[in-house]
Image: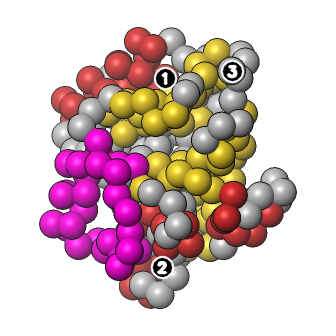
Amino acid sequence: MSLEIVRLHLADLDSFNNIPVHGFVIKHPRAGAILVDTGVGWGNEQLIQEWKVVNRHAADALAEHDLSPADVKIVINSHLHFDHCGQNAVFRHAPFYLQRTELARARKSGEAIEWFDFTGARFELLDGDVEIAEGVRVVATPGHTSGHQSVLVDTSAGASVMIGDAAYTADIYAEPDTADLAKWPGQHSNRREWTRSLKKLHGIHPHAVHFCHDTRVV
């Protein structure tokens, strides 16, 4: 079974190196559309102003690919930073797959908690690497946060990885040991775990790597 990946442009963070914010849809013939990350939400003006967010509605991004929020049957959050779970409530009909350790971390931090820990949110809590649907699995990649995960998909060309924030850019992914992180604060919360996770992804030898904050595909 071959699966298709569609990239969504969900926002821009003008105060952080003018980076884009992407989500991804995995078009799955049996499970339905699987959404990886939901972008930035609305209502938390402090976050929006601090990061100079140029925001988009997830529904508008989906419509560009003839999809609607109702088509999304599963949401996978790579992690629960504000720019990856901000529009989770748009998909409150779907379960949210994330690492158990990530939910605990995010609840403790309290950042944008209203965007993911709302009434009725259904969490499917994972402990490590797990298959979500045929040809789709998450792999634990801690380091950016303690509960960060990436998503591995079988496509006709080979395995593709949606890397979340395990690496902000293609350059960082390519050379994790020597990458200049001076202008990328927050790339890791634990350098040793972060390096180990990137080497784990390298070891998979993916055909393609998709980034949340870089338009390039490795």
Q: In front: 217, or 68?
A: 68
Label 1 or label 2, whichever comes before in sequence order:
2
- The x, y position of residue 65, in whole percent, is 81, 54
- SS category of the residue bearing label 3: loop
Q: Using the image, tell me which numbered label, if any, was put on residue 124.
A: none
Reply above or below: 213 against 84. above
Residue at x 65% of width, y 46% of height: 32
Q: For the residue carrying disc 2, how many other residues have a C-alpha within 10 Å: few (<14), some (14-19), or many (20+)?
A: some
Q: Quadrant of the N terminus?
A: top right
In this rendered view, identify the residue nearer to me: 208 or 170.
208
Q: Amino acid at mark 2?
A: Ile
SS of the residue at dot 2? Answer: helix
Amino acid at dot 1: Ala
Question: Which of the two discs, 1 and 3, labels the residue nearer the N terminus?
Answer: 3
Q: Give the CA separation, mark 3 to mark 2.
A: 40 Å
In the image, is residue 111 above or below residue 46?
A: above
Q: Viewer-proximal residue, 207 or 51?
A: 207
Where is residue 200, by image quadrant? Answer: top left
Q: Quadrant of the C terminus?
A: top right
Q: Residue at x 52, y 82 (%)?
A: 42
> Depth-wise, is mark 1 or mark 3 nearer the camera?
3
Residue located beneath label 3 in the image: 1
The residue stretch that appears in magenta = 97-126
Asked if one can make out residue 184 in the rendered structure from this viewpoint, the answer is no
Residue 162 higher or lower than 2, as above or below: below
Residue at point 51%, 60% (across, down): 94
Mark 2 sits on what residue?
Answer: 48
Residue picked out by circle 1? 174
Looking at marks 3 and 2 on the same chain, the residue that comes earlier in the sequence is marked by 3
